Amino acid sequence: MLEIVKDSIDLLEQMFYNQGMDAINRIKMLSAQMSLEPSEEISAIGGAACPKLSPRKEEAIFVHPAVMPNGQRIQLLKTLLTSACERNCFYCPFRAGRDFHRATFTPDEFAQTFMQLNRKSIAEGLFLSSGVVNGGLRTQDQLIDTAEILRHKMGFRGYIHLKIMPGAERAQVERAMQLADRVSINLEAPNTARLQSLAPLKQFTDELLEPLRWVEEIRRTQPGYKGWNGHWPSSVTQFVVGAVGDTDLELLHTTERLYQQLRLKRAYFSAFNPIPDTPLENQPPTSPVREHRLYQASFLLRDYGFSIEEMPFDGTQNLPLDADPKLAWARTHLTDQPIEVNRADRQELLRIPGIGLKTAEAILQARRQGLLRDLSSLGKIGAAAKRAAPFILLDGHRPAYQISLW
């Protein structure tokens, strides 16, 4: 009886929202605004410093050039199962009560449509989210049903990034992890107080943070072969930046905890842009440079051994916009105490502007062959030598470089 009721609800939703639109036109509509949610696409790899690549359009379907967790590049369809939503998030184009044309799919219909695109090589992978309709539990079931049809009925073995809905249960999270290559829950704000101003119907700890904890608990306590393709998926989250007075300190403090405690693969930062007919439509947009600085700082926390206490926050608890955080730190700490490249360990090398993860390893390897004595030697193994020059010693000497204004 319950299944009959669910089927009736699905049919009524389709009739009300779709208004005779065919499946391809619904995909066009549902994918059009997904650039608001950064994920694996190339333009999100380094934040705003990378050019914002326009998604490739095939028959006006938005498909994004994307990099998978394993480094593979594919064409990723980012879309929703439905743009109908009962939540009232103040920044969101899909919020309840906003006047615009919505569309929806049943799981089976969506899976068939996606496979048509996949067979035509238009979409190689899928990022699937949804508006919340009739509660988070039912919406999560719809997402899981879609992934199950793709995996087990249609044999799709490509990349799936599956959203976890606010209010999902632990068993649903586990099932999603068994079907997806990546799962994500958007925290949207760094803490309860900021979330209340951004999305008042969402609960920061119980609905959003707790599922992220479940993901890590499942990965830690259950064998990986129970996951898709023999391993558990990675997990990520996203923050909306600058809409409700949030500071970089708040955002990065939460990000650091997620990296350390929940093995989050990465945090995505989305600079706020006002949407017409939403409560925050008159708020100013957030600078994309701020978004980029947050990405840079988050990578320092995740990969370079920096701590939140070392971030160069200004008096407003934000990062400087005129310099990347690693350079700002080095100006304070290394200008008068440069690092000897020939004796520094890996962690010390990673503190030097112009030296990244691969370059640090290359320096350690090159030192086995002899001393590095000049900037050209450093440049040949991949360092941005001129950028590093003010903060290093080479064989006990400061390298000659042209002084430039900071």
Image (cartoon, grey):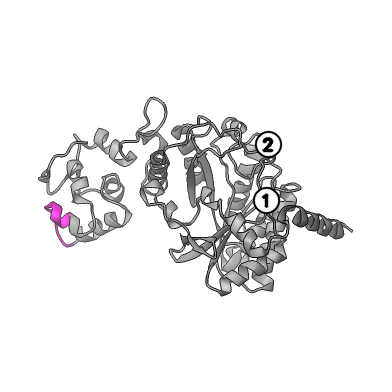
- Residue 347 lies within the magenta run: no
Please name whichever residue, 375 or 37, is drawn nearer the observer in this view of the structure: 37
Front-most of 104 and 207? 104
- Magenta part of the chain: 369-378
Q: Secondary structure at mark 1?
A: loop
Secondary structure at badge 2 equals loop
Q: Which residue is mark 2?
A: 201
Q: Are marks 2 and 1 in contact (CB under 8 Å)?
A: no
User: Which of the 4 image quadrants contains residue 172?
Assistant: bottom right
Circle 1 Cα neighbour tier, 10 Å, few/some/many (<14 / 14–19 / ≥20): some
Q: CA separation, marks 2 and 1?
A: 21 Å
Compared to residue 192, the image places residue 175 above or below, namely below
- Residue 173, position as x, y percentages in the image: 66, 54
User: Residue 166's spot in the image, x, y percent?
Assistant: 66, 45
Tell me which corner region of the image, top left, top right, bottom left or bottom right, holds residue 197.
Answer: top right
Left or right relative to 13: residue 4: right
Label at residue 328: none
The reply to whether residue 127 is visible in this rendering is yes
Chief secondary structure of the magenta portion: loop
Q: Amino acid at mark 2?
A: Leu
Give the residue at the far front of this rendering: 20
Give the residue displayed 38% in from the left and 34% down from the top: 319
| Residue 9 on image: x %, y % | 81, 54
For marks 2 and 1, the one nearer the N-term is 1
Which numbered disc covers residue 102?
1
Q: How many marks?
A: 2
* Closest to the observer, 191 or 350: 191
Q: Amino acid at mark 1?
A: Arg
Q: Residue furthest right?
A: 1
Q: Quadrant of the N terminus?
A: bottom right
Task: Indicate left or right for 219 with 290 as reference.
Answer: right
